[in-house]
Image (cartoon, helix red, strand yellow):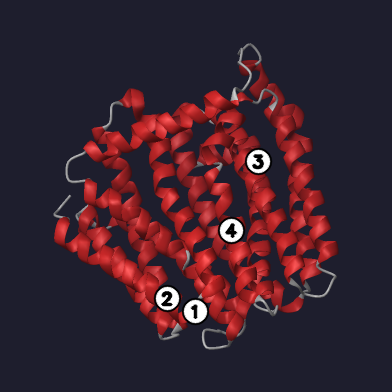
Amino acid sequence: MKKILNNKLYLKILISDLISNFGDTLYFIALMTYVTEIKNSNLAISIVTLSESLPILFTIFLGIIADKTLNKVEMIIKTLWIRVVLYLLVAIVMNFRASIMVVIFASVVNLISDTLGQFENGLFYPISNRIVKKSDREETMAFRQTVTSTMNIINQSVGAFLITILSFFHLALINSMTFGISLLIMLLLKSQVNKYYEEKTSSNNRLPLDFRAAFSDIRSNLRLSIKHLFRINNMRTILLVIPILNGSLAILLPLVVVNLSKGTALTIINAATTISLLGISTVSGGILGGALILISNKFKQLSLGNLLQMNLMTILLSFIACYYQNIYLIILGSFLSSIFVGALNPKMGTIIFNNIDETKLATIFGGMVTYFQLGEVVSRLIFSSLVIYFPYSYITIIYIVVVLIATIYTFSKVQNV
């Protein structure tokens, strides 16, 4: 811990990232609250959900581009400049009367900003790798995860409060300012980071990016990953169900927002507070799940199958609570599900590490993440279509049926894995 706190450069970069994360959280809550106030709210929610989903599809490709980028620090600064300008434009547009056109513009900006954010993360990975000693990396990653999750809870709470006292114009302006502060920090650190990083990378010869070859690599890596994953003993059922689990969790918040746009049945104080509390329950549940794996022997002894079964049951509880419009039960279900997800992830990672040839680990892990995220993307795309044509209760029933089938299938197939 002392080594991390003594690494001033790493802490400054982490602070820059945390500041921009606050802006992202504030903007997301503001945008979700904004769509509940316009007439054509279902279409608006569909558009916002799409803007949140599509950047996930670019993850691998953006990683390849980031690896091929030579002047990473300069590129990070450029992406921050673009995001500052984009949210200044959103602030101007938010001065107009609430309408679907404003939502479309704000969602396009959200899509571009999230895509740039993923690209920026890819640029940061090798920089962080250089400024943290190899012996300190595991502890540093755990520290970063804990700090980021804790700050996410604070961000949700502060965001909900600010939305009650500020206009959407001011919220977009604050978001732009957070990226401006991150930009200023990176400009001040530019020479220091370059000195630390370029000395070790300037001699590297990188080939220019071949887009056709990149797409071919992505396709072959994903196919190879799925093939290896399905070869692991007793894993077929779990690997079939986890994308359904992820996809169901991904649309819980948009489903609540649909209800908030139609009435006050799920409202706690106001729409922003409700959205924030749901986000806090998810983050805090994930933190607790990871902690329980470390400190509780009983929790540690639960099999992957057991955790998956309990996870599906809590998600089912959340959707049933959605149908009966009980927000407190929805939050409880989201919290419990996040605990089991927090415990499921390290167990899943351990199985991969123990069963895959170490020379293929990076490829398999990258493909695994993409495979699991596809469930989330597909679910959001389906939800974006359903929300335009079907009422809230019908969509809820559809997801109750899907999760119930997955739960029954899991109990009938999964043994102690």
Residue visible at 17% across and 55% down in the picture: 414
Residue 153 location (% of width, % of height): 55, 64
Identity, as a three-letter code, of the amino acid under mark 1: Tyr
- The residue carrying pointer 4 sits among few (fewer than 14), some (14 to 19) or many (20 or more) residues within 10 Å by Cα, namely many
Given residues 25 and 384, the one toward you in this image is 384
Residue 201 visible? The answer is yes
Identity, as a three-letter code, of the amino acid under mark 2: Thr
Q: CA distance from mark 4 to mark 1?
A: 18 Å
Identity, as a three-letter code, of the amino acid under mark 4: Leu
In this rendering, is residue 335 above or below 151? below
In this rendering, is residue 337 above or below 185? below
Residue 392 disc label: 1
Given residues 199 and 71, the one toward you in this image is 71
Q: Are marks 2 and 1 in contact (CB under 8 Å)?
A: yes
Q: Secondary structure at mark 1?
A: helix
Which numbered disc flags the more N-terminal residue, 4 or 1?
A: 4
Q: Secondary structure at mark 3?
A: helix
Identity, as a three-letter code, of the amino acid under mark 3: Ile
Residue visible at 47% across and 33% down in the picture: 136
Q: Which residue is mark 2?
A: 396
User: Which quadrant of the figure has residue 40?
Assistant: bottom right
In this rendering, is residue 260 above or below 198? below
Q: CA distance from mark 2 to mark 1?
A: 6 Å
Residue 50 disc label: 4
- The residue carrying pointer 1 sits among few (fewer than 14), some (14 to 19) or many (20 or more) residues within 10 Å by Cα, namely some
Q: Which residue is mark 3?
A: 13
Q: CA distance from mark 1 to mark 3?
A: 43 Å
As drawn, is 329 to the left or to the right of 154? Answer: left
As drawn, is 108 to the left or to the right of 325? Answer: right
